[in-house]
């Protein structure tokens, strides 16, 4: 049995607790990503992504005995710290923290259980590749929380843009102000509004208050905000600015993690997730975690185990067990152990949950087809690098004795001099070719957290795109292709920071298929905020869930009446939402009618500006809030 000695509760003998045929009627399990929870008396099972751990911690506090079964040797899903190269600790997948709801931070006492954050200021650095400047240092753009300093930096490229930047920030802040309160509100039940009885609709009117308040906050600028989320981000930025370095720097947040170009309609929607960030009361902040991202998962797990939860590693689930009546009975592990329970909560991806783990006979064919058609293609190749010194950028030469400078703590954007470079990189990947000049976000968490590397050395995270999941010409992502792409990335960095390649001690290359294989991310999908297809109306953008039919929070699956549903239709949700989903499962509903999770838009999909503000707000705010709640930390 694989278990982690980190958690005292893990010493519990799972074999000795094998359920007997005549089990207590109180048994209750839950299931999650690649981690599952199981408990006695009342039992919950989940995979241990950080979101599943949050659900376990809340459930345990409510008196629901919870057991977490993790597929890998380490908990946390994509939020893990791994020592791949001796002495160097990497946030191997996710590498920055934000969008962690303040209530979760407080309720689970994460600071008490060891979570320590490093906020970054400045936070963005974009060096230029410039020749013919008469021996002058190439220009660069450094952005932080000091608006006067930001304007000074932008003035290098455009005085006009420097004057417009504070207004742009204020414009985006109002959007955040309108949407942020909705993240902690219950999701709107669109299906009930459309198909429910008159009494049901009247009861649901109160749930519209937060949306109405958000619409009033946005006021007369609602059409402009609507454009931000539906138009190409290049169109939006062109209305504000004229300098390409500034536009490209801002545009990176509209495409990062998504197989999309800054010229793709809806790319501004991705930008929203980044401006929605926040840490320790600082709006828009994205920070490093002391000890790496695994420290987030460890703190949540410690909060859960301190209240009695049990966590097991190396315990992959083989399938969800369903009886002849279509009711969940528990799960079967790959080692043959059966865990009996009435409830299973899945934090796994929809594809894994419904197409691999769930008996197919109990799912409608149309539902399975929609799940199989989910577009989770990822453009990301993550490269973790160990170096023996800091990168020395031509645009910002390093200090003596290899001491970190302010720009070293930033997200460093390379090959981002203009938005055309980003678009060209995207087009190459669409054709099945890794980008020749990939967009690179380079982060050095050890610049603020020296515990991650030996003295004088550093760990570097390279979040690069665009790389296709499937290569053109029948090629596969073998060792040769991985190294060829990584060498190309290193050549690009060398152009900005000569000597970088000579400083490399070792590297870990994770292409989209690697991210899928190791972390269970279908298609290597690193995040959940890709914009809708250009031909898809905004109304149908995951208004409530991914598919037209399946479990919801207020209804069970059509063939599992009187029993709670066992899974959501999205992979790791924002912790608060998964917690609420899990709590609901403890109160089985009686309805067994099929439900429509993503209502079809009317034949006329265009929105007329003269329509009531409420209708417009409902049309785009609901799917946005739903998707934000489903984003990775």
Image (cartoon, rainbow, N blue to C red):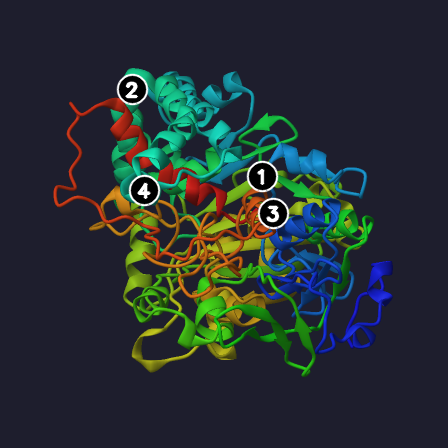
Query: Considering only vertical position in the picture, is 15 above or below 268?
Result: below
* Residue where numbered disc 2 is placed: 221
Mark 1 → mark 4, Cα distance in angstroms: 50 Å
Mark 1 → mark 2, Cα distance in angstroms: 32 Å
* Residue where numbered disc 3 is placed: 583
Point out the frontmost of discs 2 and 4.
Answer: 4
Q: Residues within 10 Å of mark 4 (few under 14, many from 20)?
A: some
In the image shown, does 286 or 349 lie closer to the viewer? 349
Q: Based on the displayed image, in which of its 4 quarters is residue 22 positioned?
A: bottom right
Point out the frontmost of discs 4 and 3.
Answer: 4
Query: Considering only vertical position in the picture, is 403 above or below 433?
Result: above
In the image shown, does 593 or 450 lie closer to the viewer? 593
Of the 4 image quadrants, the one containing the N terminus is bottom right
Residue 566 in view in this figure:
yes
* Residue where numbered disc 1 is placed: 410
Q: Earlier in the sequence, mark 1 or mark 4?
A: 4
Residue 176 is situated, as x and y percent measured from the top left of the image, at 45, 27
Q: Residues within 10 Å of mark 1 (few under 14, many from 20)?
A: many
């Amino acid at each position: 049995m694989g278990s982690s000695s980190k958690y005292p509760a893990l010493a519990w003998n799972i074999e000795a607790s094998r359920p007997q045929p005549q089990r207590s009627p109180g048994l209750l399990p839950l299931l999650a990503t690649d981690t599952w929870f199981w408990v006695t008396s009342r039992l919950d099972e989940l995979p241990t992504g950080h979101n599943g751990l949050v659900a376990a911690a809340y459930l345990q506090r409510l008196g629901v005995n919870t057991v977490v079964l993790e597929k890998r040797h380490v908990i946390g899903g994509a939020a893990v710290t791994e020592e791949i190269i001796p002495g160097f600790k990497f946030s191997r997948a996710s590498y920055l923290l934000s969008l962690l709801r303040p209530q979760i931070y407080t309720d689970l006492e994460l600071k008490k259980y060891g979570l320590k954050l490093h906020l970054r200021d400045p936070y963005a650095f974009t060096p230029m590749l410039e020749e013919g400047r008469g021996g002058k240092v190439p220009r660069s753009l450094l952005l932080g929380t000091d608006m006067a300093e930001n304007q000074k930096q932008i003035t290098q490229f455009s005085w006009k843009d420097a004057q417009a930047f504070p207004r742009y920030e204020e414009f985006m802040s109002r959007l955040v102000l309108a949407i942020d309160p909705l993240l902690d509100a219950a999701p709107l039940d669109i299906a009930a509004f459309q198909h429910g009885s008159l009494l049901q609709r009247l009861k649901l009117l109160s749930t519209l208050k937060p949306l109405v308040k958000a619409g009033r906050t946005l006021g007369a600028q609602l059409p402009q905000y609507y454009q931000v989320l539906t138009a190409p981000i290049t169109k939006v930025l062109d209305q504000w600015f004229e300098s390409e370095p500034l536009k490209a720097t801002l545009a990176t947040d509209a495409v990062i993690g998504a197989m999309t170009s800054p010229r793709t309609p809806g790319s501004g929607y991705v930008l929203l997730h980044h401006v929605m960030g926040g840490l320790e009361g600082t709006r828009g902040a994205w920070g490093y975690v002391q000890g790496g991202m695994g420290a987030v998962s460890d703190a949540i797990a410690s909060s859960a185990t301190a209240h009695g939860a049990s966590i097991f590693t190396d315990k992959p689930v083989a399938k969800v067990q369903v009886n002849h009546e279509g009711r969940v009975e528990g799960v079967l592990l790959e080692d043959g152990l059966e865990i009996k329970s009435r409830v299973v909560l899945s934090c796994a991806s929809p594809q894994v949950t419904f197409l691999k783990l769930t008996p197919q006979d109990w799912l409608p064919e149309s539902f399975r087809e929609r799940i199989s058609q989910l577009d989770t293609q990822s453009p990301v190749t993550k490269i973790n690098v160990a170096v023996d010194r800091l990168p020395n950028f031509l645009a910002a030469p390093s200090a003596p004795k290899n001491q970190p400078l302010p720009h070293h703590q930033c997200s460093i954007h390379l090959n981002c001099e203009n938005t055309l470079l980003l678009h060209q990189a995207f087009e190459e990947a669409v054709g099945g070719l890794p980008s020749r000049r990939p967009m690179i976000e380079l982060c050095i968490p050890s610049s603020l957290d020296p515990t991650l590397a030996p003295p004088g050395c550093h760990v570097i995270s390279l979040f690069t795109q665009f790389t296709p999941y499937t290569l053109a010409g029948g090629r596969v992502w073998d060792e040769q292709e991985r190294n060829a792409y990584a060498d190309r990335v290193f050549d690009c960095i060398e152009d900005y920071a000569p000597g970088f390649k000579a400083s490399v001690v070792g590297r870990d290359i994770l292409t989209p298929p690697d991210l899928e294989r190791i972390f269970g991310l279908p298609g290597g999908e690193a995040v959940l905020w890709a914009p809708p297809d250009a031909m898809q109306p905004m109304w149908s953008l995951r208004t409530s869930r991914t598919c037209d039919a399946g479990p919801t929070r207020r209804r069970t699956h059509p063939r599992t009446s009187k029993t709670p549903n066992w899974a959501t239709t999205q992979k790791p949700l924002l912790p608060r939402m998964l917690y609420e989903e899990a709590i609901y499962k403890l109160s089985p509903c009686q309805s067994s009618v099929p439900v429509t999770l993503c209502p079809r838009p009317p034949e006329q999909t265009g929105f007329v500006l003269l329509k009531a503000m409420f209708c417009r707000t409902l049309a785009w705010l609901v799917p946005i809030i739903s998707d934000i709640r489903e984003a990775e930390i």
